[in-house]
Image: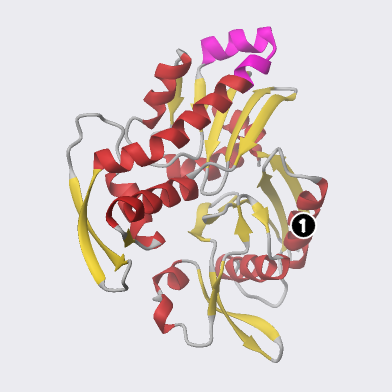
Amino acid sequence: MATIELSIDLGSKFITIYQKGIGLVLREPAIAIATKSRNRLEIRDAGYRAESVMTGSLGGARVIAPIKEGIIVDEEMATMLLNYFLKKIIPEGIFMPRIKAIVSICESSSGSDRRAVEKCCIKAGIKEVTLVESGLSLLAYTNSIGGLFVDIGGGKTEISAVTNHGIATGCSVNIAGDAFNNAIIDSLYMNYGVKVGEFTIENLKKSALSFYVNDEGSYAVSGGSADGSPRSLYVTAEQMRDAVIPLVDDIIEVIMSVLNQTPPELSAEILQGHIRFGRFSPHPRTYRVSRTSSRTPRYASQRRRKRNCHRRRKVL
């Protein structure tokens, strides 16, 4: 029987799958459109196709995001979604191949959270599941003997001081891409009385949010006003920066707290080997903000979107 080896990242925003010997085979949003049939949910669309469907045209269906803040909140839907994606990358045949997978998890995950991930993978058709903390997979990717790794995802930020023998100390906070979106939405509503949708803010954040002080760009967005009428306005990079900078300061504070708890020998290695950012939102100069605060050199990935999967390739 043929064996397929995969590395899987079950993120709050994206599910990424790497196949040994082929490369990156899937990276799609971790959402699905489900309809109820015979008292059970069935997936109608998932991934990018589900993301492209307008909310008003769903009819009796509903959009489900089974993974939030790095934790599986809907076990049944997460299993169905993972099985849906596996069928897209595994060729159909008389004999199904044996699937082995390395799955990245948050180091702060509790025992029940880890069991939920393992259970979903097994139900989806994976025969052998190995759970690896994201900090250790990032260590394997960089081929270093240790360092401080900052992994900013969609729902959670993980900071961990890692050595070849394991994670020395670490922390995770629920401040990440979703929190940035909510901060910008709240700021626009408080200042202009306009409620902008999450999908619009997500695209605006990726394309326009900048931490350069001299960035004077402005961008048009549309939303609903307090009285329900549609309304458009121009949002500047400075307004978005002012909305999210308190959250960036909170992340920097957590980084400094982890550094204070790091053993002296590892601190010396961090000074020599730099702080490394893993999954990171494509915001210009964000990592320079943390460099200025912690006075420590660091690297930021040049290919941030694919790095999260390639680092698990090293573990695989």
Membership of 36 in magenta stretch: no
Residue 186 position within the rendered picture, expressed as x and y whole percent measured from the top left: 40, 52
Residue at the bottom extreme, as displayed: 38
Magenta part, dominant SS: helix
Please tell me whether residue 47 is drawn above or below residue 215 in the rendered image: below
Looking at the rendered structure, the secondary structure element under dot 1 is: helix
What are the residue bounds of the magenta stretch?
258-273
The x, y position of residue 307, in whole percent, is 49, 40
Tell me if residue 75 comes above or below residue 176 in the rendering.
below
Q: Residue at x 46, y 82 (%)?
A: 58
Quadrant location of the C terminus? top right
* Residue at 41% over, 75% down: 53
Residue that extends furthest to the front in the rendered view of this protein? 227
- Check disc 1: other Cα within 10 Å, few if <14, some if 14-19, many if 20+: some
Q: Residue at label 1?
A: 116
Residue plotted at (36% across, 48% down):
187
**Which of the 4 image quarters holds residue 99?**
bottom right
Give left or right: position of 179 versus 264: left
Residue at image position (62%, 64%) is 66
